[in-house]
Amino acid sequence: MKLSKNFFYTIREDVKDEDSTSGNLLVRGGFIKKSSSGVYMFMPLGHRVMQNVEQIIREEMNAIDSQEMNMPTLIPEEVYIASGRRDIIGTSMFTLKDRYQKPFVLGPTHEELFAQAAQMNIKSYKDLPLSLYQFQTKFRDEARPRFGLIRVREFVMKDAYTFDLDKEQGNASYDAMFNAYKRIFDRVGLDYRIVTADTGIMGGDLSEEFQAVTSIGEDVLVLGEDTGYASNLEVAENCSRLVSNEEFKDFEKVHTPNAKTIEEVAAFLNQDVEQFVKTLIYRVDDQYVAVCVSGNRDVNEVKLGKLYQANEVELADFDHVIELTGAAVGFAGPIGLKIDVVVDKEIEGLRNFTIGANETDYHLINVNHHDFKATHIHDVSNVREGDPNPEGTGILTFSKGIEVGNTFKLGTKYAQAMNLHYLDQNNKLQDVYMGSYGIGVGRTVAAVVEQNNDDKGIVWPINLAPFKVAIVVINAKNEDHVQYATELYDELQALGIDTLLDDRQQRPGVKFNDMELIGIPLRITVGRDVETNHVEFKERTAEEASLISRDDIVSKIKSYL
């Protein structure tokens, strides 16, 4: 690409309405432009980077015999009603009606349609296994779009689906896709971790996430480096146990005026926070549940939802807390409540602990588990850094990550909902076992930029860079220099090396700054050294340039590629 004849621009200053490093640099470098909240245009440079990511993905998908196709974005709402996911996805789904008032949605995900497509081919056990994938725009009405391409309302996803005879064959297909994903993210150049995750609205038997490690990540990664244990915070098992050998005491009520928080009550009673059991009231679908955890723990709402197989879990509003406990908020306790009581496993062995008395300004001390009835004793709390590793060695540490890919073992959930069956060897009808797999292409680009940048701009891994080489002409008014640079440009292009020729009528400093901002990995400078048949060569991350003979520069470039 010759910049003097192409669409190219950069922005000198930081962008005010971008709240992430990647969003700021991609906008400044002319890769993307915000159209509306959570919706971006991909400019020519950004489009090239996206194509590079897609090509890596496409090569690895084709290598495992997954076949590419394309699904519609406009989907009848009834498809999601049939699978039972319309209410689960809820307000995150963009909806509209056609001229006949028939309801449609902009597809947030395509499991249902792929199941319908598979029906056209899958009749017998001889038709399986089968693997399909696509690159498709998805739409999700995020309540709070942010962080550039990381949390948006319109995005390109590569989603793939496997169809198998049974769980055993499905596991083999899953492993093939899983390993392809590892190769993809290795080639992209990401520092990532693979963590066990919540299956969420997808459902199914297993979910694993590919998380790019970065401080801006919205997900908390729980890692046991001694064993390789890795999990999303939402599903990480809390193996910590508070055990007491004290003799059981009789509980008694104490006056705790103006002490509502755990810290205030602990200080008032001169107790350790771990001796306090806090009780939180949750609305779990259509019922209310009291959850008891250690005073210094947080309730894990995903675990609570899984326990009740619920679609919605949220803290009860103040009015319902007051109605259920008979006390002001901050004084709830499990004794005397007429709702389910869930006790976290961590405190199962705790004795003589303190709880709310369900009476304003009062708490109960020396309470024990035999003083009330627990409906469930279950792991419903979040782990903390320093907790024991569930795999038995060392402790847990935390990191932050951006989810760039995910893999799901769906089982037969969607096959049953969409009537996707096959005839087995005994001529009996069986449900197809499905897997679902996704990669956020834009998110992957953003994650790469979050991990690869400096104070000058983006530092693209060479596999993703929009151009591998930039040739900068110092004096674009010097026809001999321009001709010299153009001949080198043509030679590199003929070799299939994506090359950018900066032949603009701009100051050298502007050109150098632009090439560093947009992150071109290799730079050749054509200046006064052409008189001795030399050019300057510089890697994006190098401090200094080196002088290279014109006769050697092409082989030098090829050695990097």
Image (cartoon, helix red, strand yellow):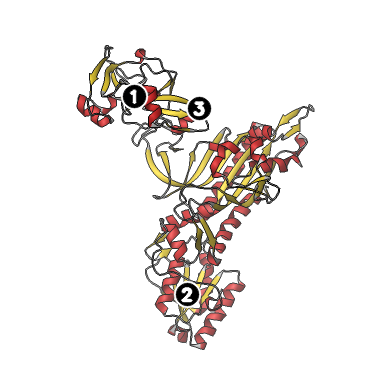
Q: Residue furthest right?
A: 427
Q: Compare residues 39 and 234 and report the one nearer the observer.
A: 39
Q: Which mark is residue 547?
A: none
Disc 1 secondary structure class: loop
The quarter of the picture where residue 165 lies is: top right
Residue in the image at 23% along x and 19% along y: 254
- Can residue 53 be seen here? yes
User: Label 2 amino acid?
Assistant: Ile
Name the residue carrying label 3: 286
Name the residue carrying label 1: 332
The quarter of the picture where residue 360 lies is: top left
Please tell me which of labels 2 and 3 falls first in the chain.
3
Disc 2 secondary structure class: strand
464 to 273, vertically: above or below: below
- Spatial CA span between label 2 and label 3: 66 Å
The quarter of the picture where residue 452 lies is: bottom left
Q: Are marks 1 and 2 in contact (CB under 8 Å)?
A: no
- Can residue 463 be seen here? no
Q: Residue 166 at x, y = what percent?
A: 67, 32
Name the residue carrying label 2: 524
